[in-house]
């Protein structure tokens, strides 16, 4: 199998699995218990918190709240902030956010909030009544990176909390929250080689946030519920490994592979459109529009050859609507429908890329003949 769908999810690394196993076998105590059998487990959660904080450059481990993943972190950040600041009724976001932000914002509109969806310079829409700005660090479909440093500086100056969905950015580009004054930041385990169903929300000290779950005092009462200990430990390990890869220049290698892939394809098919190419992008993501062809057909035919890619995002698969992200970027419905997303991983090789190009070439000629 050639797996080029790493923005949908990633493989759990053996080191991550190994770190998790003891928490299903011997170390199954409850970290909140007073007895040593339970209490010893809490130390491993502390370590995972340090590992996650280190990946983000968080100043304090206590700023990390473990959640079930990106979706929950986004919901906690947004709704939790609004609940904590009931006097303000305006949200600023972008039209290209993940559904866990966009659909929540639509729900907030039904609950009486006003939402501004601005693709360029969202920070310019901040007003007196703005309770929160929520902007993703990098887009899951195109890999386009938002200028979070700039947006964060304006938000700080205007004293408005900024939430950043960094689900796709974490582990792929350096994030240093000592330098960038973000208030809240979401990350997800399964995008960086940890299991599905674990993630975190970074909450800068001093940020007002109400919990969504009411119950025990876990996670300093910010997220009630007995901890997913094995998931948390695996997530911590995955954060540590991701940080090592960033330091060791792995992302530069992925960028080279991706750029060569795009260059070769553009030589063979000069009519393709590489979405977001004029912007700063994640190293691993390539969103390509094959005009007049169906992205879904390309995706299915590649699948038959054991090459995994996707049209748009897994979250919107099955919907007949063309991607909201590509639409917001100015693509027409035909161009959006002809789009395929290739997302490389640190394990992707040049041979795999070559094979993908060869297979893709055959598929494109075949589809062109029948279209
Ligand atoms: N935000 C973005 C940008 C994503 O790509 C995803 C995953 N597709 C999520 C949030 C949701 O994360 P999770 O699957 O962990 O709920």
Image (cartoon, helix red, strand yellow):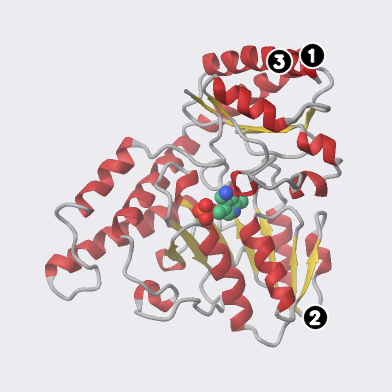
Q: Give the residue at mark 3.
A: 264
Q: Return the disc, 2 or 1, that comes first in the chain's sequence.
A: 2
Instruction: Judge whether residue 308 can be spotted in this image.
Output: yes
| Residue projecting furthest to the front | 370
Q: Give the residue at mark 1.
A: 369
Q: Nearer the viewer, mark 2 or mark 3?
A: 3
- Helix, strand or loop at disc 1? helix
- Helix, strand or loop at disc 2? loop
Image coordinates for residue 298, horizontal then vertical, percent? 67, 26
Residue 222 image-quadrant placement = bottom left
**Cα separation between marks 2 and 3:** 50 Å
Instruction: Judge whether residue 249 can be spotted in this image.
Output: no
| Identity of the residue drawn at 82% across and 35% down | 335
Q: Give the residue at mark 2.
A: 128
| Residue projecting furthest to the bottom | 87
Count neighbours of disc 1 (C-alpha within 10 A) and say few if under 14, some if 14 to 19, many if 20 or more: few
**Pointers 2 and 3 in contact (C-beta within 8 Å):** no
**Pointers 1 and 3 in contact (C-beta within 8 Å):** no
């Amino acid at each position: 199998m050639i797996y080029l769908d790493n923005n949908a999810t990633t493989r759990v690394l053996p080191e991550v699995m190994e770190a998790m196993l003891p928490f299903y076998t011997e170390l199954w105590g409850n970290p909140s218990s007073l007895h040593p059998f339970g209490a010893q487990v809490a130390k491993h959660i502390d370590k995972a918190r340090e590992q996650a904080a280190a990946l983000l450059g968080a100043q304090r481990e206590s700023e990390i709240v473990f959640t079930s993943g990106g979706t929950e972190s986004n919901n906690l950040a947004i709704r939790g902030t609004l609940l904590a600041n009931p006097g303000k009724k305006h949200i600023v976001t972008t039209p290209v956010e993940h559904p866990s932000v966009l659909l929540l914002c639509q729900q907030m509109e039904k609950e009486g909030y006003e939402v501004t969806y601005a693709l360029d310079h969202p920070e310019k829409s901040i007003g007196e009544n703005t309770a929160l700005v929520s902007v993703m660090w990098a887009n899951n479909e195109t890999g386009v990176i938002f200028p979070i440093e700039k947006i964060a500086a304006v938000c700080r100056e205007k004293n408005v909390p900024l939430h950043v969905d960094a689900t796709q950015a974490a582990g792929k580009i350096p994030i240093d929250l000592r330098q960038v004054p973000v208030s809240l930041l979401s990350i997800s385990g399964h995008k960086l080689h940890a299991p599905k169903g674990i993630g975190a929300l970074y909450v800068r000290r001093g940020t007002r946030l109400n919990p969504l779950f009411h119950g025990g005092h876990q996670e300093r009462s910010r997220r009630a519920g007995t901890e997913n200990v094995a998931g948390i430990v695996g997530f911590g390990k995955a954060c540590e490994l991701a940080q090592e890869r960033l330091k060791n220049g792995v992302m530069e290698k992925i960028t080279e592979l991706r750029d060569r892939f795009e260059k070769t394809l553009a030589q063979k098919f000069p009519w393709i459109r590489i979405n977001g190419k004029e912007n700063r992008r994640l190293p691993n993501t390539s969103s390509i529009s094959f005009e007049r062809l169906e992205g879904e057909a390309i995706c299915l035919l590649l699948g038959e050859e054991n090459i995994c890619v996707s049209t748009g995002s897994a979250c919107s698969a099955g919907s007949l609507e063309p991607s909201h992200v590509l639409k917001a970027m100015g693509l027409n419905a035909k161009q959006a429908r002809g789009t395929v997303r290739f997302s490389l991983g640190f394990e992707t090789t040049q041979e795999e890329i070559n094979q993908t190009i060869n297979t893709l070439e055959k598929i494109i000629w075949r589809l062109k003949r029948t279209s």
